Amino acid sequence: MKNASPFSVLGAALWLFSTIGVTHAQAQSSPTWAEDVACLIYSHCTSCHRDQGIAPFALESYQDAQGQGVALKLATQSGHMPPWPAAEGQGHIGFRKNLTWQEKEILRQWVENGMPRGDSTQEPAAPTFASSYQIASPDLIAEFPTYTVPSTLTSDLYRCFIVNNPLSGTHYLNEIEVVPGNGDAVHHVLLYWDNSGIPAQKDSADPGPGYTSFGGIGSNSAVLVGGWVPGQDKWVAPPSMGFWVPQGGVFVAQVHYPSSAAGEIDSTKVRLKFSPSIVRPYFMDPILNHGANLTNGPLVIPANQVKTFHAQYTVPQDATVASILPHAHLICTSMKALAITPNGDTIPLIDIPEWDFHWQMNYRFKNLIKVPANSTLHGWATYDNTAFNPNNPNSPPQLVTVGEATTDEMMLFYFGYTGYQNGDENTVVDPSGHAVHHAGCAMTHLELPEPNSAWQWSPYPNPARDHWHVNAPEDGLRLRVLDGLGRIRFEGPPPPTLDISTWPPGLYVAEMQTERGTFVYKWSVGTF
């Protein structure tokens, strides 16, 4: 298999997909656009794939989807779309944008069965975006100046726009809705509050509306309070919490314009909702970062090298964590963070095995997570500064160090957190964990049976001592085993067995990547 052509591997994979679903398709009527696929597309795709959206083609009707059917099948089966870089098997993450196995199967069957429309009178209405704001009555609408992206733009541009905070007294910001003025131009937006006066100075010194700043907004005292990426709904603070916003200062929106936005006109705005009565301040800080707590720094990646960096931080008191936002630049290839409690338990936070600079998200948890005092936060990031990295901006590769330019690098994990109160871990923020469907629509064929037991993954024994029988499923592609500290003990094509006779006792997590997704299995190595 090592020397197999990538085209033959892809062909085998596509054949495998089709054979897996044969019994399902034969056992029931085919999914139709009206009953199933319209809801799927409108809920997961149309917010980007629409007129004036950031995606390259529209998916706003049956005809649109029918014309892109094969592309839809390939993109969703591979996991390329919808964009959701977090690894599968992370059930603690809420508001997930990725498709479930069953949703992928519905789309696959629909395409392979000829894309039937069904009863058009049963189709859900397509979503509209012209004026349907999610925060109906904001306390503040921050409208930033109209900006024309330079027609000569050939690389990513980060432009910062400021608006004064007109509110009197202290408020708690608990809802944020970013409204891009031009979906063809805006890639993502980060929103800060700052009272240093530096953004105004930079704005005055830079011709035209706003000022250019990579990384942050140029002020070390700036507080990140929210942001937006394509497909993201409004941000809502956890119950009874909000960002503390004193009187005065400015709000600064850092807007990312990709090179494809050259010549476009944009006027982004932000709609904000405050509460004067919230008593629990909420914070978002890069607690794990490349400056203060790297254990093997500095963050320097020589040309033609692959390096992994580790950061750690001991939590001084009980904390409640609601979200995590990893940040890095182009040559980063993976990011991961977790916490180890004083009694040795592992708290998973985020695992992004294939980092994508263009899809940086704030991952919110289904439940608030308690991180006990004296727990240790761990973060890892791997950087590939070789010619084999297709995202490397330099050819040939050059020395890369810390900096705000896209061609520099960073390693930041922003935590959304507050001080712990008894029972926080029982607070459910997102009961389902899955994206809310458009207008409450449902799919008739969603309750498809899972693959039969022959396709499940059942490694053994557990606990194990000398050898662990992997028992990989027939569509198993890759196995990764991590110890309690998140260190990789094995990674590669799944072998029949693993020799674990020299592994220390403890809890391990095995991740089996298959054509249907990734299965996660916890098992113990003992000394019995």
Image (cartoon, rainbow, N blue to C red):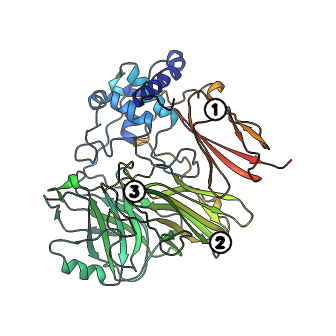
Task: Tell me the CA gap for discs 2 and 3.
Answer: 35 Å
Counting residues from the start of the chain, the first of labels 1 and 3 encountered is 3
Give me the C-alpha separation between circle 1 and circle 3: 32 Å
Residue drawn at the location 36% of the way across and 21% of the way down: 118
Which numbered disc covers residue 331?
3
Q: In the image, 75: left or right of 52?
A: right
* Circle 2 residue: 318
Report whether 60 appears left or right of 360.
Answer: left
Which amino acid type is shown beneath numbered disc 1?
Answer: Ala
Q: Name the residue tied to disc 1.
A: 472
* Cα distance between the residues tagged 1 and 2: 40 Å
Element type where label 3 sits in the image: loop
For residue 257, what is the image quadrant?
A: bottom left
Q: Up-down: is 182 above or below 436? A: below
> In front: 512, or 257?
512
- Residue at 44% x, 36% y is 78
In the rendering, at what x and y percent does residue 520 appear? Answer: 62, 43
**Which x, y percent locates residue 361?**
43, 56
- Select label 1 or label 3 by which is in front: 3
Task: Out of 505 and 22, give the one closest to the viewer.
Answer: 505
